[in-house]
Amino acid sequence: MESVASSLWDKILEKLKEKIPEQTFATWFFPTKGISYDNDTIIVEVPNPFFIDWIEEHYLNILSDVAFSILKSNIKISFRANKVETIRHRPELKEIISYPSPRTNLRDRYTFESYVVGNSNHFAQAAALAVAKAPAKTYNPLFIYGGVGLGKTHLMHAIGNYTLLNYRDLRVFYIPAEKFMNEMVYAIKNQETLEFKNKYRNLDMLLIDDIHFLRDKESLQEEIFHTFNALYSAQKQIVVTSDRPPREIPSLEERLISRFQWGLLVDIQAPELETRIAILKKKSEIDGFEVPEDVIFYIANNIRTNIRELEGSLVRLLALSSLTNTEINLTTAKEMIGSIIGSKKKQINFQIILKTIADFFDVSEESLTGKRRTASVVLPRQVGMYISRELTSLSLKEIGTKFGGRDHTTVLHAYDKITNLIKEDKEFSNKVDKIIRKLTS
């Protein structure tokens, strides 16, 4: 079946090429090939295990949509790593296969065991686990909200996977709100609305991701409302995620807001430094790589508000290291992902930084930019210089000028001092981290 798989995968790639940037396609899809197609499953070979992580995280949904547009039916897309023998520190690894089941749409690698818990997400994780242990008995619905890339989707899949493992007879289904709408439109167009309604209203657990997609879509809100009522009345579990709480979703009907608030609302915040470090260590452990502490710290200290980007940077580093047989160290990390980290840094207005520093340390803005070197002001001022260099495009000289006409060597000294303090003093590191997360959130 290799020729069939190769032909089908080539067709999928031809359509995919029209939807993503040329460089992206060349990097992540040109080295792949279809090697088997059987029982509605296409197996695709990729250069190494890290391609699987990257493609799954960023392109699996669009690949599934493209495949559906070609075959007019859902198929499984499975990835196998080819050059696994090049992976250092894990010679026993033979094969990695990963794909969502079309019966549930769940990704089996997203589990509670692989979810790193910290201060920013422990309440959401506890609520999710409680729901998974007793579907429709504790919190129904469960509404999880938070910014992009903070782990909401991971928790949702973990709920579904745990439920299936412990309640094998339950019908569980995960779907993004946008895909729900696409299915609804397809059903209406093909006069299959009854089948569509039955599919979703006869589930035991419905997991709807990115419900904020409902805004300004009246017909979709109507269908979600009736689906919600049918499931809730039948005492079935509903789990929803959004980038904001229900009442802050624009143009969301009051009756839906009310129903989403019947159960429990939990939020996920941007992870603190310790959690980010733990996430990277867990990721590298799962993928079988030993990543130096200074590389872990470099990534964790520079990507602060998005777990998806945090893991993505590590995956990219590991993938490029594996492909080029390059040793992973701080120098190669800066070369490989430094530009990406730099491009992700949000440019913050200096006056906002100044006000935030002043409020946090309870000093005046005038004292931060003044000439006096009193003990209560020196450290906050140095933190301000450090953050200004991290989050703005200002030169050392320009930063010095804004902080009372100091020269660039003073700014560089302040930057180096704060950098060392962050590494040596965990409590101080958390303080600086908290300020930066507040500025970039």
Image: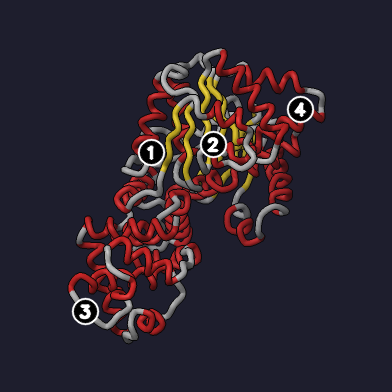
Looking at the rendered image, the disc whose residue lies closer to the viewer, 3 or 4, is 3
Q: Gap between marks 3 and 2, in whole Å?
A: 48 Å
Q: Amino acid at mark 2?
A: Pro
Task: Looking at the picture, tell me which residue is in the foreground, 262 or 333.
Answer: 262
Side of 131 relative to 67 (left or right): left
**Spot occupied by residue 29 in the image (x, y as percentages of width and height):** 61, 52
Residue at the spot 71% in from the left edge and 47% down from the top edge: 10
Crowding around mark 1 (Cα neighbors within 10 Å: few <14, some 14 to 19, many 20+) is: some
Can you give x and y, in whole percent of width and height, for residue 168 in the image? 48, 16
Within 10 Å of disc 2 (Cα), the crowding (few <14, some 14-19, many 20+) is many
Q: Earlier in the sequence, mark 2 or mark 4?
A: 4
Q: Could you tell me how far apart the alpha carbons at marks 2 and 4 are, in whole angstroms?
A: 27 Å
The answer to which quarter of the image holds residue 36 is: top right
Marked residue nearer the N-terminal end (1 or 2): 1
Amino acid at dot 3? Arg
Q: Position of residue 236 (x, y in %)?
A: 53, 17
Pointer 1 residue: 115
Residue underneath mark 2: 246
Which residue appears at 47% of the width and 18% of the height? 136
Answer with mark 3 or mark 2, whichever residue precedes in sequence.
2
Q: CA distance from mark 1 to mark 4?
A: 36 Å
Q: Is residue 382 left or right of residue 213?
A: left
Q: Disc 4 marks which amino acid?
A: Ala
Q: Which residue is mark 4?
A: 187
The mark found on residue 373 in the picture is: 3
Badge 1 amino acid: Tyr
